Image (cartoon, grey):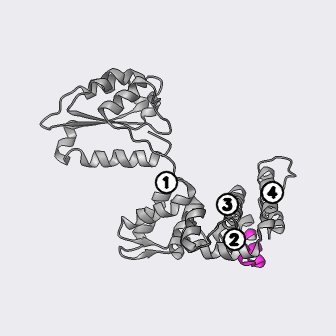
């Protein structure tokens, strides 16, 4: 159960692939769907005995569709059939841990709660996912992919699957691969915008923002505003660190050590006293982008205005 459905799908898929040998699945594996079944049917199926096998596997996908009647499963959960392995895929919701059903499952089974990954954890997750395929990925490429796609692990995984079809085992997925096969520019993205601002390359920053204005679907205004806010918050945190050691700074900022030099360079350009006013400007731009006290303008114009105040 939980708010990261990708992990729920992965766990249920792994159980389907491994609990029963392939030759036992026809008679001993049942997959039900919450919107097409009932608690009564689930219990009935679970009480069957396996045929020529030690266990049967019952998987209820979309079990959250049964949330109104789920507590009716309590009696079965308190005395489950020993030869049945029941898997409930309860997406984007959680059982009430104070109620009897949750307590019965905790006593006689296992509850796995899946949570959304924080944005700063996504590049590492991508690296691990790629490593499992006997490939590697350049960290910056992973970071660009994570920020551009966002925390939708299902979509991220689909993009990685596509890239792994193109890149041979033992090779590295690069920014060039991301640009060619995912459609994310290696030159015009939020990482390059922050890098340009931190280095004082204002002309390049305006060039990137102009590109964003011409491709608003790929580079939505709110995404860029959030990225800039996170960047200046990192600078604020960096200024307050007692130790500027790269490893210490990376841990405190929640970033890969790869990016610490860029933060260090940006901190020299933006003294502490300049950052709080900039954060205020970005907050105002965020409200305007959401329609609060704003004159209607294009996303490109809004970015140009914001850049003129922070660069």
Q: Mark 1 Cα within 10 Å, few/some/many (few <14, many 20+)?
A: many
Q: CA distance from mark 3 to mark 4?
A: 13 Å
Residue farthest front in this picture: 242
Residue contact at pointers 1 and 4, CB within 8 angstroms: no
Q: Which mark is residue 193?
A: 2
> Mark 4 against mark 2, which lies toward the viewer?
4
Residue range in magenta is 196-209
Q: Quadrant of the N terminus?
A: top left
Instruction: Identify the image quadrant of the C terminus.
Output: bottom right
Which residue in the structure is indicated by mark 1? 153
Q: Secondary structure under badge 4? A: helix
User: Label 2 near label 1: C-beta < 8 Å?
Assistant: no
**Label 1 vs 3, first from the N-terminus:** 1
- At 35% from the left and 33% from the top, the residue drawn is 106
Can residue 150 be seen here? The reply is: no
Of callouts 4 and 2, which one flags the residue occurring earlier in the amino acid sequence? 2
Q: Secondary structure at mark 1?
A: helix
What whole-number distance in Å separates the C-alpha atoms at marks 1 and 4?
32 Å
Residue holding disc 3: 230
| Alpha carbons under labels 1 and 2: distance apart | 25 Å
Decide which of 144, 263 is in the foreground and name it.
Answer: 263
* Residue 71 in picture, x, y percent from top left: 41, 23
| Dot in front, 1 or 3 | 3
Q: CA distance from mark 4 to mark 2?
A: 19 Å
Q: Is residue 103 above or below residue 155?
A: above
Disc 3 crowd, CA 10 A, few/some/many (<14, 14-19, 20+): some
Q: Are marks 2 and 3 in contact (CB under 8 Å)?
A: no
Front: mark 1 or 4: 4
**Alpha carbon of mark 2 to alpha carbon of mark 3: how far?**
13 Å
Q: Per the image, is 82 magenta?
A: no
Residue 280 got which mark?
4
- Note whether residue 294 is visible: yes
């Amino acid at each position: 159960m939980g708010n990261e459905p990708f992990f729920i799908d992965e766990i249920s898929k792994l159980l389907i692939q491994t609990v029963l040998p392939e030759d036992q699945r026809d008679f001993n594996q049942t997959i039900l769907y919450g919107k097409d079944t009932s608690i009564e049917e689930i219990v009935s199926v679970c009480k069957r005995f396996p045929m020529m096998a030690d266990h049967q596997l019952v998987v209820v996908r979309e079990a959250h569709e049964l949330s109104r009647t789920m507590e009716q499963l309590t009696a079965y959960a308190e005395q489950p059939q020993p030869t049945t392995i029941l898997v409930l895929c309860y997406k984007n919701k959680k059982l009430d841990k104070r109620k009897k059903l949750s307590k019965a499952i905790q006593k006689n089974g296992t509850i796995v709660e899946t949570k959304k990954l924080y944005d700063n954890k996504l590049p590492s997750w991508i690296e691990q996912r790629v490593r499992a395929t006997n490939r590697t990925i350049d960290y910056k490429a992973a970071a660009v992919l994570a920020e551009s796609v966002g925390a939708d692990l299902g979509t991220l995984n689909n993009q990685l699957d596509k890239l792994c079809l193109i890149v041979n085992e033992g090779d590295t997925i690069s920014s060039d691969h991301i640009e060619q096969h995912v459609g994310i520019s290696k030159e015009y993205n939020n990482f390059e915008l922050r890098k340009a601002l931190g280095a004082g390359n204002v002309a390049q920053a305006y060039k990137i923002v102009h590109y964003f204005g011409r491709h608003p679907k790929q580079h939505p205004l709110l995404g860029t505003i959030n990225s800039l806010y996170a960047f200046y918050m990192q600078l604020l945190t960096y200024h307050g660190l007692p130790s500027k050691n790269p490893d210490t700074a990376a841990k405190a900022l929640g970033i890969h050590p790869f990016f610490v030099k860029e933060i260090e360079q940006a901190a020299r350009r933006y003294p502490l006293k300049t950052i709080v006013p900039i954060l205020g400007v970005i907050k105002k731009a965020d409200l305007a982008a959401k329609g609060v006290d704003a004159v209607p303008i294009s996303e490109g114009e809004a970015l140009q205005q914001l850049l003129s105040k922070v660069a």
